[in-house]
Amino acid sequence: MEGAQAELGQHPAKRTCRRSSCLVLNVGGSQFLTTRETLAAFPSSFFGSLVSGRLPTAVQEDGSIFIDRSPTHFRHILEYLRNGPRALLSISEEAQDELLLEAEFYSLNELADKLRRCQLMDKHRMTFSPRTVKIDEDKFEIGVLHGRRYGAALFDVQNPDTFDICFDCSDGWAHLPELPENHPMMFVGIVPKDVQLSSEWQKLPSFLPKHQHSPFFDVSDRAFWMDSIWPGQATAPLPLAACEAKWPAEVEVPPCLVDGAFVALTDCVFPGVDAFARSDRAHGFLTQMVTQGDFKKASTEGFSNWSSRPINYVQMSFARTTVSSRLYVECGELGGNAEATWRLNLEDVGLDRNVPYRPVIFYGTTAVTSVQDKCTPA
């Protein structure tokens, strides 16, 4: 093979460079000839540590240094070490994803950022149909999720420190007869990237949000809970005792809720409401910001929002700086105004701002969701 890759078994002494400068790397059984200067180009990388002596080396009998990684894309790694950001990597998306894993292993962070894109990272009880469809100037659909109860999907992003992603649920979710009433239909949020999506859901205490901006108090001076666009619906306060009797004491949730920040979406069914909303069974809609799995806090004003309009999209914007990590979340009905918004400083809600977070969605019922990235594909 040409350039950097030597034939298997060929001794480095037969190369033309100075023996003190040349190194032979045995990467997964394939040998590559390079120099100490090339490997030292990125001092904080795996290779910088290797030539500085900070990492122990596995020297073979022929003098080569063994690295237990795939050799398939290693020539691209060497090309990047030689040329830095100027390196031209004309490879397929599949190869790009494989090379990303290698770049992350070798701690070539700038290369990893160059290769990373918004894509499915992991899934459970889901199918994902990838596609790229331009929605507007700065938003692209990257695929469609089909899933059922306990399904989940985790996404990688182009820049883990700054991302903007939207989950469009306008195709709706199924109100299946066996599903308990007043349980969240969907959870959308951020979690550590090494989360286990298949972990068994657990039960947590649930609390009916009944603050002054709930439908259980006088609504005459604010936006109606039961909107006049649905004829026959009352705008008077709902009967609190009867509604509390319909509210579950516990809800089933993915266990990783305790490690992140989530919006829980619930279609609510209450007594004393004669007409139905545009949803096929809901009387109203509840969105809650749940941090560290705390549903009690999520029932308070500022963390819960009641709406007469269906919630069918959740947009999240995450931004990390050297001093803070912030999350902005917006929920609402497509084509209308946002029904609920939250701005969180992660440290203020007890979350570690330095954790590598990724966007995730969990289904509490059967649903279809379009996933949209607000960054232009490379």
Image (spheres, rainbow, N blue to C red):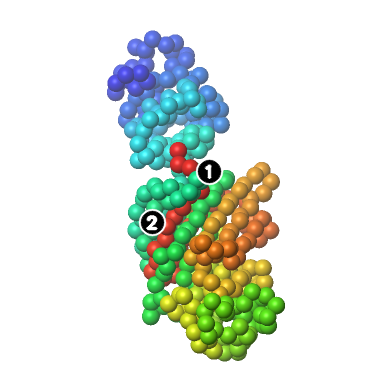
Q: Which mark is nearer the camera, 2 or 1?
A: 2
Q: Which residue lies at the image location 54% right of the left edge and 63% below the top edge?
A: 336
Residue 171 in the image: state x and y as whole percent: 41, 65
In this orientation, does residue 350 appear? no
Q: Amino acid at mark 2?
A: Val
Look at the numbered disc 1 and give the secondary structure of its residue. Answer: loop
Q: Position of residue 27 (x, y in %)?
A: 37, 30
Q: Position of residue 29 (x, y in %)?
A: 32, 30
- Look at the image and tell me in which quarter the N terminus lies: top left
Image coordinates for residue 42, horizontal then vertical, percent: 54, 27
The amino acid sitting under disc 1 is Asn
- Viewer-side residue, 113 vs 356: 113
Q: Is label 2 in a helix, a strand or a loop?
A: strand
Q: Residue at x 44, y 11 (%)?
A: 18
47 sits to left or right of 61 = right
**Is 66 above or below relative to 135?**
above
Residue 159, labelled with which disc? 1
Q: Nearer the viewer, residue 161 or 217?
A: 217
Label 1 crowd bin: few (<14), some (14–19), many (20+), radius 10 Å: some
Identity of the residue drawn at 61% across and 48% down: 319
Residue at position x 48%, y 42% in the image: 376
Q: CA distance from mark 2 to mark 1?
A: 21 Å
Does residue 305 appear in this view?
A: yes
Marks 1 and 2: in contact by CB < 8 Å? no
Dot 2 surroundings within 10 Å: few (below 14), some, or many (20 or more)? Answer: some
In the rendered view, tell whether residue 268 sits above or below residue 257.
below
Specify the quadrant of the image occupied by residue 174: bottom left
Q: Which mark is residue 144?
A: 2
